[in-house]
Image (cartoon, rainbow, N blue to C red):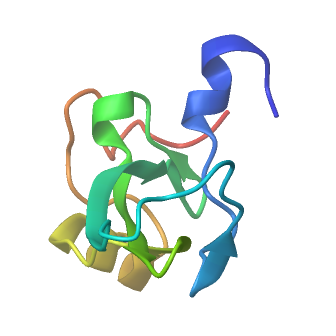
Amino acid sequence: MRPGYASGFETMRSLVNDRPLEVTGQLPDWLRGTLIRNGPGIFEAGPDRLRHWFDGLAVQHQFELGQGGVHYRSQPLQSPDFLEARRRGRIYYSNFATDPCVAKST
């Protein structure tokens, strides 16, 4: 992991299908449901790097709560940006601070 804020630009290298999480303490018996969050998680496509946190390709995080436990899974959001980057092997669309014409890593 890189020091300071730079670690926020690291691409998630592995996605999680269904992992039980360790719970410290106890969850109330009545607490059940799903919490879904999304945010940047992929900052590169082939040789290209996204240059700003607002540009990161989205990863969806799901926390399933029930029966005293929590299970986690993650997956990339199947956005047009993600699908084109995967299909072409590079960044295709312009973003907040990343121009695909100059996004090549140095």
Residue drawn at point x = 33 percent, y = 47 percent: 100
Residue drawn at point x = 49 percent, y = 58 percent: 27
Q: Residue furthest front?
A: 29
Question: In the rendered view, would you say 73 is above or below 42?
Answer: below
> In screen coordinates, is 94 left or right of 7?
left
Image coords of residue 49 (percent x, y): 52, 43
Residue drawn at point x = 41 percent, y = 72 percent: 65
Question: In the rendered view, would you say 34 is above or below 44?
Answer: below
Image coords of residue 74 (percent x, y): 48, 72
Instruction: Give the total of numbered labels.
Output: 0
Nearer to us in this view, 76 or 105:
76
Q: In which quadrant of the rendered view does residue 26 lie?
A: bottom right
Nearer to us in this view, 71 or 99:
71
Image coords of residue 28 (percent x, y): 41, 60
Residue 28 visible from this viewpoint: yes
For the C terminus, the image quarter is: top right
Residue drawn at point x = 65 percent, y = 79 percent: 19
Nearer to us in this view, 89 or 7:
7
Residue 98 visible from this viewpoint: no
